Image: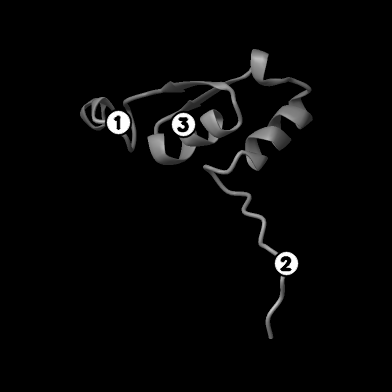
Amino acid sequence: MTTTIQPTFIGKPESIIMEQAMRVLGTDVSETLMVGDNYDTDIMAGMNAGMDTLLVHTGVTTKRAASEV
């Protein structure tokens, strides 16, 4: 069976999860900061949603790896 419906991805780094979080919190991108330790998921999700981001170097993405991005 085939369909013409395209899937909707909701996990990071898709922006839909960030947009829903802002709706729940009652905020917008001008007053929201995405803080994360994984550049490829956390930071990219924030960037895709248009918000400011802060990468902490205590987790998945090291300072050295971040300097290569």
**Which residue appears farthest toward the bottom when viewing the image?**
1
- The quarter of the picture where residue 63 lies is top left
Q: Identify the residue shown where x is 24% and y is 32%.
A: 65
Q: Amino acid at mark 2?
A: Ile
Callout 1 amino acid: Val
Residue position for label 1: 69
Q: Which mark is residue 5?
A: 2
Q: Position of residue 17 (x, y in %)?
A: 65, 40
Which numbered tag is attached to residue 43? 3
Q: CA distance from mark 3 to mark 1?
A: 12 Å
Element carrying mark 1: loop
The location of residue 37, given as percent across then percent down, is 40, 31
Q: Viewer-nearest of labels 1 and 2?
A: 2
The residues bearing labels 1 and 2 have C-alpha atoms spaced at a distance of: 34 Å
Q: Quadrant of residue 36?
A: top left
Residue 7 in the image: above or below residue 20: below
Residue 43 shown left or right of residue 29 in the figure: left
Name the residue furthest front.
4
Whichever of labels 3 and 1 marks the residue nearer the N terminus, that label is 3
* Percent x, y of residue 7: 66, 61
**Mark 1 residue crowding within 10 angstroms, few (<14) / some (14–19) / many (20+):** few
